[in-house]
Image (spheres, rainbow, N blue to C red):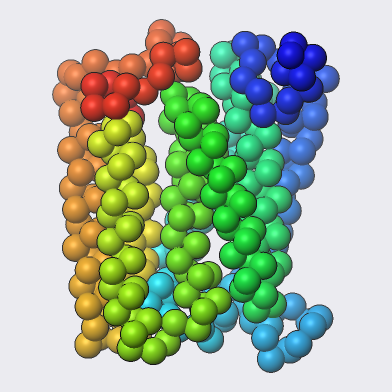
Amino acid sequence: MERAHAMNPFAKRESHGSRSLIVYKTLTILSWLLVLVLSVTYSFGSPSDGKRSHNHTIWGQNKHNRTPFSLNPFIADVYWITLLVLQVGYVGHLFSNNSEWVTAAANVGSHFIVNNVLQSAFLLLWVRGHFWIAELMLVLNFFNLTSVYFRHPATPNLVHIPVVSGPLAWNFVALFWCGAAMVGAHSLPARIVANVFIWSFLLYGMFFMLAFKDYTMGLNMSILTASLAVHQFFIKIVAFQWIFAFVIMGVLFAFTLALAIPPYFGKELTFNGNGVVDEDRERQPLLSDEA
């Protein structure tokens, strides 16, 4: 058992050897650069291989496949640029002199690398119109990110947001974004079904805020829901989808503020003296004050 634990790259450890840290640092930087390069490349140009009629830029594909879950490019781009910048900070934790920060960052490192690889695969497939396989990549990544959330529920926010909650919220929304394009959700019955499924955004965000008091998931989901709401308003103003999306965004954002603001007015935070949450103390549903 000890040997299996030692060989498991996803195992939680109290400390990491210099060799494993070098591997984490190298693969983390390379996989992050892969996502960055593909994101920039396909934001401005479409692939030249395969069937040209199916190939588009990231947001060209969004425009070509107008569905009830299409997103506003500007808001989604701001979300991703912010996330990528925060991930630079996460990478910096791997080079920190604070051993607790290094351990917290390295413990989620394998999941972050897998996330980057699957996100890169999704981008390559999405811009080529291979929606079914792209959806499979999102499903696999959903399990990966859900796993890291529940296995490491108390990482410091500077690790939690760029590695866990930020990518997880995006992946959840992307499942519907790509899934709608995959099934060609353009008809009236499809829009009616979408009017029901949009409420899963509220349920998903509220689950993490109520069960774990994680306001970062609420904020992430509210931003991405705003991206959907704005785009739906401009592509089909006579519809319920954008109205529901704005309502969901408002509720999520209100609960986010309700959880995020009180600690700044004297409520005890659940960080230790070094600013790092002790992962051995799990987030207590409805009881912990931790975000």
Q: Quadrant of the C terminus?
A: top left
19 relative to 219 in the view: left or right: right
Relative to residue 143, is residue 1 depicted above or below? above
Q: Which residue is drawn at 62% across and 24% down?
A: 107
The residue located at (54%, 34%) in the rendering is 148
Image quadrant in which you'd find residue 41: bottom right
State the residue at coordinates (54%, 49%): 142
Up the image or down, 38 lies above or below 155; here it is below
Residue at horizontal 73 percent and vertical 25 percent from the top = 8
| Residue 99 image offset from top left, x and y in percent | 62, 12
> Could you tell whether 170 is left or right of 200 in the image?
right
**Nearer the observer, 244 or 22:** 244
Question: Splitting the image into 4 quarters, where does residue 262 fall?
Answer: top left
Residue nearest the viewer, comparing 154 with 181:
181
Residue 283's place in the image compared with 232, above or below, is: above
Can residue 181 be seen here? The reply is yes
| Percent coordinates x, y for residue 283 in the rendering | 36, 23
Query: In the image, 126: left or right of 182?
Result: right
Picture coordinates of residue 194 (x, y %)?
34, 73
